[in-house]
Image: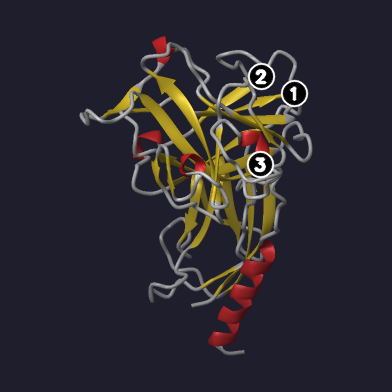
Amino acid sequence: MNKPFYIFLFILAFCCEAKTQANLVPNGSFEDTLSCPNNGGQIGLAKKWFDPNLLSSDLFHSCASINYCAVPINYFGYQQPYHGFAYAGITTFWNSQPDYREYVGVELSENLINGTTYCVTLSISLADSCQYGINNIYVGFYNDTLGIIKNILTPDSKYLLPHINEISKNSWSKTTFSFIANGFEKYLTIGNFDADSSVNIIYNSNNNFAYNYAYYYLDSIELKECEIILPNVFTPNGDGANDFWRVDLLENSNFNVFNRWGVKIFETTAKEIEWDGNNKYGELCTDGIYFFTIESKEKHYKGHIQLIR
């Protein structure tokens, strides 16, 4: 069997390891609507979405009849959708209105499973009109909607969005994080759950025409069970293509490689596992089938790796 065919097997094996997980956030891009928005504060026109504290969360859509809530130009600035032809918008801080907060909320298509690791991905952009940007934007979860209507929400659990300081006005920033579910999570909310006294301002414009709030656009929100893809062929021949066996995990794990006789030849502990095809003494391993185990606090994996030089 020649090497190009082996590489074909690698591509096939790699693809087949990936399982398509359903997005548990219905209408995550806000495109499916009950009707076109014709004013501000109409997030409820996006099917499945609601305004948790009944203030003024916005829906922007290309079918809007007025500029206030249109796409791409609207009251808060200019932004093309990250996906499709709609997005949402919320005020997360307002300097002249103490503890003013807006949120978006949605009921998940199914309750989360206790002990299961989920990944949240969303796209976010700071609106052009903003004087401020803040570091206090979260994804929160509720088990029901009782008591949810208040100025500053207090979800049952919350997770701070990573890399908030990298969000710009010019483009969308895609951010993702993972968490282990408690099993009660039924409703997802996005916004600032901190009081003004705890707000960390990371952007302050000197533009005298900017409005004194921090307003963010949101798009393409996904919540899925996290996938771990385990390739089973690699070619460490120094040609710069597929020279390492790599797996990105959600936590530090023990990775062990064994030869056909069950002798451990390589081990490492890391969150991002990488094997170059050498044994623990730095010697080249020969072509053949090797076996691996990955053990973490939450997950255990095992399988085989075909090494082809």
Q: Is residue 298 visible?
A: no
Which of the 4 quarters of the picture holds residue 185?
A: top right
Q: Which residue is mark 3?
A: 46
Which element carries disc 3, helix, strand or loop? loop
Upstream in the sequence, badge 3 or badge 2?
3
Depth check, front residue: 195 or 14:
195
Which of the 4 quarters of the picture holds residue 182?
A: top right
Task: Categorize mark 3 by other alpha carbons within 10 Å: few (<14), some (14-19), many (20+).
Answer: many
Q: From the viewer's perspective, is 73 left or right of 246?
A: left
Q: Amino acid at mark 2?
A: Asp
Upstream in the sequence, badge 1 or badge 2?
1
Q: Is residue 34 visible?
A: yes
Q: Which residue is mark 2?
A: 156
Label drawn at residue 143: 1
Q: Position of residue 180 (x, y in %)?
A: 65, 33
Q: Position of residue 170 (x, y in %)?
A: 34, 47
Q: Amino acid at mark 1?
A: Asn
Whole-number angstrom distance, CA of label 1 to CA of label 2: 7 Å
